Image (cartoon, rainbow, N blue to C red):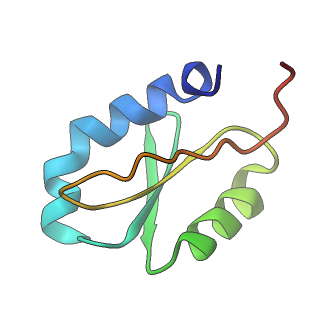
Amino acid sequence: MEQQHLTQELATFEANRENLLGTALNKYVLIHGTEIVGTYDTEHDAIQQGYRQFGNVPFLVRRISPVQDVANYLSGIVAI
């Protein structure tokens, strides 16, 4: 279910992955919808900015790395 909420964000990440690898390797990217909000030194900073800017809604924070980490975290409440 989590993946459904982040389909647009994941597509935006993949479409911009090569550029992000070249400009922000090992940082964390914050994506909301099709917008790359910014890159941050820590995952915590990216998540904090996501909550500040968008509130408790789905957004993606992902480490910019040639090998992707498996974990995705969904902000907001999801009923199962």
Give the side of residue 66 with respect to residue 31, left or right.
Answer: left
Q: Quadrant of residue 3?
A: top right
Image: 30 above or below 42:
above
Q: Taking 33 as reference, is 18 above or below it? A: below
Q: Quadrant of the N terminus?
A: top right
- Relative to residue 13, is residue 16 drawn left or right? left
> Left of 38 or right of it: where is 72?
right
| Figure label count | 0
| Residue depicted at 27% across the width and 37% down the height | 14
Residue in the picture at 26% in, 71% down: 24
Q: Quadrant of residue 75?
A: top right
Residue at the spot 51% in from the left edge and 78% down from the top edge: 42
Q: Quadrant of residue 44?
A: bottom right
Q: Is residue 27 above or below residue 60?
A: below
Residue at 76% from the left image edge and 63% from the top image edge:
52
Q: From the viewer's side, name the closer residue of 67 and 16.
A: 67
Query: Farthest residue toward the bottom?
Result: 41
How far across and down, in percent of the image, does residue 55 sit?
Answer: 80, 50
Front residue of this view, candidates 69 and 16? 69
Q: Which residue is most to the front?
A: 70
Q: Quadrant of the C terminus?
A: top right
Q: Position of residue 65 (x, y in %)?
A: 25, 61
Q: Position of residue 46 (x, y in %)?
A: 57, 67
